[in-house]
Image: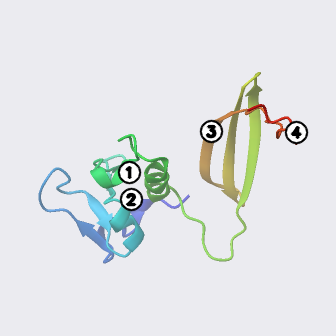
Amino acid sequence: MDDPTKSAFLHRPDLHVETSGEFTGWRTWSRDNFETHNGPFYHRMDDDGRIQCAFRVEKKHLNGTKDVHGGAFMSFADYCLRPAHEGELVEGSVEITRAGGSLIFLRGMLTSGERALFTFSGTIKRLKRRMPPVAGNEGG
């Protein structure tokens, strides 16, 4: 893995450094219109070279029940992750870790070669198949 502490991570021309407010000193990409519109998302490097990412929840991040929309979380997760590049083969694997009567639990990973790009876990609710009404027996 590339070591960003030995790169030009802190001196890239496509980074904007916040100079005021809660994210003073944090950086954000100035080249990505999608992330700017859906964020803003910020990152910084601590003294040990670990990258921290953050964003403040705004009204635009909320769904109809006034909770953060899952798509906002996915966009933020994408901001925090290692990228794949044009021409690379991205493969996914999923493992069912437990399957009960109504819930299925799973986890998976996206990779490019030996590089882990994205890990995920999820819970899926099993739905019972509804049989369509029989003609002439709609009960009504």
Q: Amino acid at mark 4?
A: Val
Q: Is residue 36 left or right of residue 80?
A: left
Q: Which mark is residue 5?
A: 2
The one nearer the camera, 140 or 67, is 140
User: Which residue has dot 3 on it?
Assistant: 121
Closer to the N terminus: mark 2 or mark 3?
A: 2
Closer to the N terminus: mark 1 or mark 2?
A: 2
Q: Nearer the viewer, mark 4 or mark 1?
A: 4
Query: Which secondary structure, mark 2?
Result: helix
Closer to the N terminus: mark 4 or mark 2?
A: 2
Marks 1/2 in contact by CB < 8 Å: the verdict is yes
Q: Nearer the viewer, mark 4 or mark 3?
A: 4
Q: CA distance from mark 1 to mark 3?
A: 27 Å
Q: CA distance from mark 2 to mark 3?
A: 30 Å
Q: CA distance from mark 1 to mark 2?
A: 6 Å
Closer to the N terminus: mark 1 or mark 3?
A: 1
